Structures are given as C-alpha cells and as structure tokens.
Amino acid sequence: TFVYINDEFVDESEGKVSYTDRGYNFGDGIYEYIRIYDGNAFTAKEHFERLFRSAKEIGLNLEDYTVKSLTELIEELAEKNNVKNGGVYIQVTRGVAPRNHPFPEASTKPVFSAFSKSYERPYDELENGIKAITVDDIRWLRCDIKSLNLLGNVLAKEKATQSDAGEAIMHRDGIVTEGSSSNVFAVKDSKIYTHPANNLILNGITRRVINEIANELNIPFVEEPFDVEFLKSADEVIVSSTSIEVMPVIQVDDTFISNGTVGKITKELQKSFNNYIESNIEK
Ligand code: PMP
C-alpha cells in the first residue's frame, strides 16, 4: 500500500513524520477527506477549494499546490492502491520546526501527507437509519476551518459510541450546530432546516450538494438556527458527510423520529444523491 508524503509515493511502512511536526505538536494544520466512487474523485474541486480556504484562514502557505495538481495526486494514489470505492485523506501541517508556539521561519515547508482506503457505501445504515445523541458543543469559534484540532469532535463521537449511537449532534446553549463529523438537518412541514454556514459549523460539501438537490426538487432549504427541541419534534432528521452521504437519523436521545422510520424527503434526497454520484462518474 502506497502513501504520499512530502512529494513522493512511498510504501506505508516508510510513511513517517517527525516528532516536532507542528501537526503532531499543536494540531497546527488542516485536512480534507475526498470520496472515491468507481475510481473517480467525487466533488474534488469543492474539497480542494475548501482546503485552500482553510489554509488561507490559518496563514498556511499552499502555493506549491493547485486544485488540479491535488486532484491528479489523489486519483493517482487511489489508482496505485487499486481503490475503486473508498476515500483519500489528505492533511497539511505547518511543517517541522523546534517546538515553539509562534509560526516557524517562513522557509519552513508545509508537510503534506495522504493515504487512501477502500470500502463500500454504508448501504444498510442508509436504508435503515442510525441513532444519534445530543451533546454540548465545546469547540472553538472557528469551526468553519477544517483544522486538525479535533479533540472536541473526538470527545463528542466517543460519547456517541459509548451510547451505541452513530453520531453525536452538538448544540451551543440549545442551538443545534452540527454533528461531530457531519452536518445536521431537520425536516419539518416539508422544509429542510439547517444551521447557517457561519463560523460555528463546517460548510460541508455534502451539505452543499443537498442544498443543490433540494433546490432542484423544489424543497425549501432554510438556513436558520433551530434548537434541540425543534430537532426532536422534526418529521425527519438527517446527518450528512462525505463518508455517510445522506444519512437518516431515526432516534435522537430517547426520542424516535417519525416512529423510528426513514422519512419520505430523506428518501427523495438519497435518490437524487445517487443520481448525482452517477452523473459525476466519468465514462
Ligand atoms: N462537520 C464536521 C465537523 C465534519 O467533520 C464533517 C466531515 N468532514 C462535516 C461537517 C461534513 O463535511 P463534508 O460533507 O464536506 O464531508
């Protein structure tokens, strides 16, 4: 299995980074996760544009890369590893330098790494839905940056796992923000509600596809804050991400959503999402 690290493809046994890498010491870096469907990178442009935005927001220099070079890179990695369906994870840190909080010397090169994995889509859960719990959102106030600092997300997801739930839905003082690794939607009276794409959430690429699909289906897409009570009284609840796609949530804490079944709008969105994937596969 190949990994890509510092400008070359190497065997994973050689994929090593320094103990003074700023990603390792400070979580000082950014990442993306891109889905591979049938050998094609899905919505790669959107993911890499978001990577460049994250880089800009934290003052990380990514001038050695372009959307095109990165797309070619991940497709090459997937091909080398024979990944037909799966994903590629990439991260960029502010580089290796003596441990000191301020930015290192300008000549310090960012450390870029990428690995791929193969897996099938989560068909069973997409059909039957998952359970979620609600937890306090204890994260910082720049959740729009896809940063390597994921401790708040990790602690939230661990709570979900301990509760036999598939996702932790976070809220700030009762206002639902997003999942520990997903965006959150409540369907009520045939409208889709989701938190506005501001500093409190990551503007998910899957969220944007859902927005586009909803527009095509003439389903109102309402970007307004809502609280946990609204979520629990919703007709349908969905979480979305690159890896879980349009995922139905049939239970939030002790409350069953739509009597524990997958709702009509969720199914419509899933169908359109499948078509969207199909139309983005070349050949
Ligand atoms: N929010 C958070 C906190 C996430 O980690 C993710 C997954 N990367 C998302 C939302 C969904 O983003 P995307 O659809 O781009 O995968």
Image (cartoon, rainbow, N blue to C red):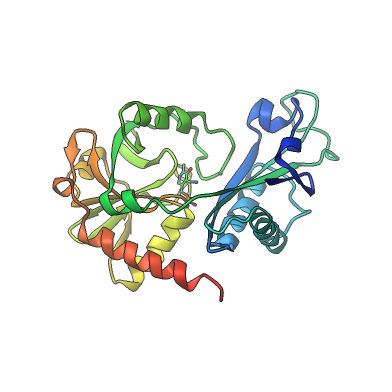
Against 69, residue 128 (above or below) is: above
Q: Residue furthest top?
A: 99
Task: Note whether residue 217 is visible.
Answer: yes
Quarter that holds the N terminus: top right
Whether 207 is drawn above or below 249: the answer is: below
Q: Residue 162: horizontal and vertical position, in percent?
A: 35, 26
Look at 63% across and 45% down and name the residue there. 57
| In the image, residue 67 above or below residue 148 | below
In the rendered view of the protein, which quadrant contains the C terminus?
Answer: bottom right
Which residue is depicted at the point 64% across and 45% down? 115
As rendered, which of 134 and 200 lies closer to the eye? 134
Query: 174 or 168: which is nearer to us?
Result: 168
Relative vertical location of residue 258 with respect to residue 36 in this rendering, above or below? above
Residue 48 rendering spot, x and y as whole percentages:
62, 56
Residue 42 in the image, given as x and y percentages of width and height: 54, 62
96 or 80: nearer the viewer: 80
Residue in the picture at 32% in, 41% down: 176
Residue 247 visible: no
Image quadrant where residue 161 sits? top left
Name the residue furthest left: 259
Q: Residue at x 32, y 48 (%)?
A: 125
- Compared across the picture, whether 255 is left or right of 62 comes to left
Q: Is residue 88 left or right of residue 108?
A: left
In this picture, residue 91 sits left or right of residue 202:
right
